[in-house]
Image (cartoon, rainbow, N blue to C red):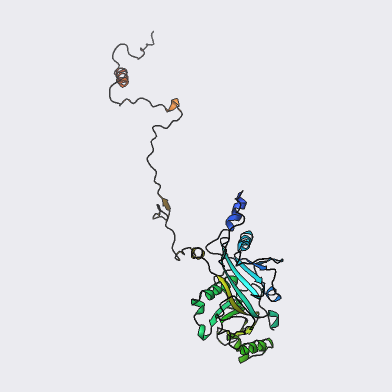
């Protein structure tokens, strides 16, 4: 059956004020996410105890009630929960007669389900079965991906294994950090692709039992080797049975003295240990996958953006240059004041009113033409 495309159930409401708009902008997808991604853990109505005990993760929202959900048949519920809780990762536990002890890993982008992968838990050993100190919750582990000689290139060539590797790194990513101290490394997770599913797993089981009992030596070292558990003859799974099993092993890191600045690293079984079988998978579309991988262009170190028309002179002062178009001020209307009226200029060329004004000034300055404007002198005798 072809997968049903997710359709939004409720359209996002339009922000009514600045506060709701900032909250909506914070939920928008960003190019680089520094914080830890939120995961939603869902139990279906038919989850088994083996699956329920493993549905734990930091930075997650765990639904307390079971839900009748089938992600591969209808993923609309996942899209609704993703937009409602601002989450991009899902882990759905299920159990049916046809697909027992199943885990569905789902990843969303922009409020829609982008891809899904179903795995089956073939065998599991809880963390409580291993002795020793446990790592602190939320610590970022170191991942080690390996494979046996017949399947050395599956992590980089097979689409299902490439998808599983990408989802695992996204789930355990935590808060993104630029660097990590050596002593801050507490866990190592080794994910190994085993050989054929029909290979005998007696050596791997002996190594696990020896590790639980506190043993050492070759038996414990055999945990690094890939070995699959034989499937029962009555099982009928709807997946490619030729795909080898995936062994998920967790180890604690301890640093020993080595006489040099670099310490000696020792690994001890930490738990939990899983053996997964890959089942159904839904790959993302090409357009959505390209949109999710879009990155911002990083600027080279030491380069600054050059501002246009801004320079620094010899004295170290910042000088700016502003270009303004020519303005027509003839039509500018301003208030008229008598004191701002322009007085006549005597040096203006002759003609019109300026000529009469010049003649009057010439008569007064020469003193001719009649009595003039001087007052007569009066003697003291009078």
Q: Is residue 363 above or below residue 168?
A: above
Q: x, y percentage for residue 49?
A: 71, 75
Residue at figure coordinates x 48%, y 77% from the top left: 157
**Extreme residue in the top direction:** 382
Choose between 11 and 323: the one closer to the eye.
11
Total label count? 0
- Quarter holding the N terminus? bottom right
Query: Compared with residue 121, is residue 66 higher up or lower down, i.e. above or below?
Result: above
Q: Nearer the viewer, residue 237 or 193?
A: 237
Percent of width and height locating residue 325: 38, 42
For this view, does 106 lie left or right of residue 48?
left
Q: Quadrant of residue 219?
A: bottom right
Quadrant containing the C terminus in the rendered view: top left
Asked whether, in this view, residue 294 is left or right of residue 54, the answer is: left
* Viewer can see residue 57: no
62 in relation to 306, above or below:
below
**221 up-or-down from 305: above or below:** below
Q: Which image quadrant for residue 105?
A: bottom right
x, y percentage for residue 247? 59, 81
**Visible residue check, residue 145:** yes
The image position of residue 187, as x and y in percent, is 61, 78
For residue 215, what is the image quadrant? bottom right
Work out whether residue 252 or residue 260 is closer to the camera in this orientation and state it: 252
């Amino acid at each position: 059956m072809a997968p049903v495309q997710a359709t939004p159930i409720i359209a996002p409401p339009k922000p009514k004020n600045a506060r709701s708009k900032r909250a909506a902008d914070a939920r928008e997808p960003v190019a680089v996410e520094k914080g830890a991604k939120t995961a939603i853990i869902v139990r279906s109505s038919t989850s088994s105890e083996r699956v329920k005990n493993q549905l734990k993760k930091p930075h997650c929202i765990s639904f307390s009630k079971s839900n009748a959900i089938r992600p591969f048949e209808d993923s609309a519920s996942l899209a609704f929960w993703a937009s409602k809780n601002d989450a991009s990762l899902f882990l759905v536990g299920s159990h049916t007669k046809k697909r027992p002890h199943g885990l569905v890993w789902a990843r969303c982008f922009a409020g829609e389900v982008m891809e899904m992968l179903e795995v089956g838990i073939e065998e599991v050993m809880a963390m409580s079965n291993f002795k020793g100190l446990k790592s602190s919750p939320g610590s970022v582990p170191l991942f080690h991906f390996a494979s046996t000689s017949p399947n050395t290139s599956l992590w980089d060539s097979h689409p299902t294994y490439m998808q599983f590797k990408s989802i695992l790194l996204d789930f355990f990513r935590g808060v993104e950090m630029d660097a990590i101290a050596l002593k801050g490394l507490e866990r190592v997770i080794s994910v190994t692709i085993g050989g054929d599913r029909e290979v005998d797993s007696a050596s791997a089981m002996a190594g696990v039992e020896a590790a639980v009992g506190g043993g050492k030596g070759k038996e414990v070292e055999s945990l690094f080797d890939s070995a699959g558990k034989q499937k029962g003859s009555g099982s009928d799974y709807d997946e490619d049975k030729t795909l080898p099993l995936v062994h998920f092993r967790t180890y604690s890191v301890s640093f020993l003295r080595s006489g040099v600045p670099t310490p000696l690293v020792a690994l001890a079984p930490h738990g939990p240990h899983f053996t997964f079988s890959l089942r159904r998978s839904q790959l993302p579309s090409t357009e959505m996958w390209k949109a999710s991988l879009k990155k911002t262009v990083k600027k080279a170190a030491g380069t600054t953006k050059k501002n246009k028309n801004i320079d620094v002179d010899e004295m170290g002062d910042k000088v700016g240059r502003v270009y303004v178009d020519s303005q027509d001020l003839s039509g500018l209307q301003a208030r008229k004041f008598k004191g701002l009226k322009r007085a006549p200029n005597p040096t203006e060329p002759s003609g019109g009113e300026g000529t009469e004004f010049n003649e009057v000034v010439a008569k007064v300055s020469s003193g001719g033409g009649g009595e003039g404007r001087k007052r007569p002198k009066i003697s003291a005798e009078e």
